[in-house]
Amino acid sequence: MEIKRDRYLNQLIVRKQNGFIKVITGIRRCGKSYLLNTLFYDHLIAEGIDESHIIKFAFDSADDLRKIGEDLWKIDEENRKVDPVKFMDYISSCVTDGSLYYLLLDEVQKLGSFESVLNGYLRKSNMDVYVTGSNSKFLSHDILTEFEGRGDEVHVLPLSFSEFYSVYDGSKDEAFDDYMVYGGLPAAALMQTEEQKSKYLITQIQNVYLRDIVRRYNLQSDEDIGELLDILASGISTLTNPRKLSNTFKSVKNSGICETTVAKYISHLEEAFLISKVKRYDVKGKRYIDTPYKVYFEDVGLRNARLNFRQIEPTHLMENIIYNELRYRGYNVDVGVVEVRERKDGKETKKQLEIDFIANQGSRRYYIQSAYEIPNDAKWEQETRSFDKTNDSFKKIIVVERSMKPRRDDKGYVMIGVKEFLLNENSLEM
């Protein structure tokens, strides 16, 4: 079954022949190879590009490696890289004229000196280069530095809810319930039973994602960073900082892991795209507040799997899903803070009101609150009070769990159901 990833496909299409190496990043199993080798390849064929001018090569494919005289099993057993000379000789044999060739390379980290090889292809006017990778280096934000400023990143998230629902056999409500529990990794989305999905996700988070980080940073084990991931998973969408987390280790885990180590481990998890650390932004003061901050997971299914599916908290998971949706749509996202002064019993005090998300894209800005339910006027006033205090005209939206079309109050604030918000790509404009 084909899952369309049109947003990412279009990002590759608009980057064609731009003089950069197109680097597709994202956590393992999020669909990078499928995007490149199936969806983008099919687009090129549909555009009339001759198959002989699309060179696909997967460095984890025994068949492809045999073309250049390499043996996948020997490479794995000997823990060595693919000979770059053999690969370049093969590419030279495929390029038979001066017209444009598309070079689609999968798992390119297995190629020896891949940075130099690919930078060399950029100097050829008839080469357009696209790569994916999934070792620790390609799972980090620093990969673009390897291409001497000539890398152009397309970051792929797990399936959005709209992508997930496009292949789901069931109602919107059933789909959202499943998505909230098992997330959007494509393989899990296509599995038929809850047992399959849960076992797959638990295996991935333990045996793939954490091991990548341990190898990349030469950690002695995954015990401490795994326990930190547990604590972060339990506290998604709540304010935290390294000191608070270090204290939690001492009180709950009976561990002496220090604040500096906690900060370092959070950076490792963030660089590997497992989590996002979201700073707070003072709306009136127009400045960032470094700490405390919030943490969200790249995929809520992985978050739930890390906790063995024991803490399925709809309010926090819905907030995480909305955050990922805003990123999927290309917005830079902050947590908003509005400082107000209140006078009580003759004394003036300062208070900080929170806006769950400030979504920015160029000159556009939206304020979004995730409110699982609004049962009465008092709750509505509580959720919109921070909106009242911003004193600006940017659009303000409340997202609730129950299905409902957009509804606007007399202040212009919009309330919309989460499924309607996620399934309509223009929901921020409604």
Image (spheres, grey):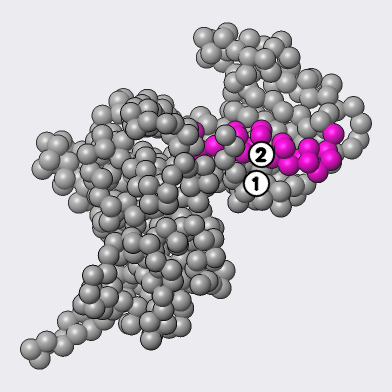
Few, some or many C-alpha atoms within 10 Å of disc 1 (few <14, some 14-19, many ≥20)?
A: some
Please, what secondary structure does the residue beneath circle 2 have? helix
In the image, residue 47 lies in the stretch drawn in magenta:
yes
Three-letter code, disc 2: Leu
Q: Quadrant of residue 211?
A: top left
Cβ–Cβ below 8 Å for labels 2 and 1? yes
**Percent position of residue 61, x then y:** 62, 19
The mark found on residue 39 in the picture is: 2
Three-letter code, disc 1: Leu
What residue is shown at x 78% (from left), y 20% (from top)?
90
Q: Nearer the viewer, residue 98 or 383?
A: 383
The mark found on residue 9 in the picture is: 1
**Percent position of residue 96, x then y:** 90, 27
Is tag 2's residue or tag 1's residue first in the polypeptide sequence? 1
Placement of 111 over or under 24, stated as above or below:
above
Range covered by the magenta-colored residues: 26-50
Please, what secondary structure does the residue beneath circle 1 have? helix
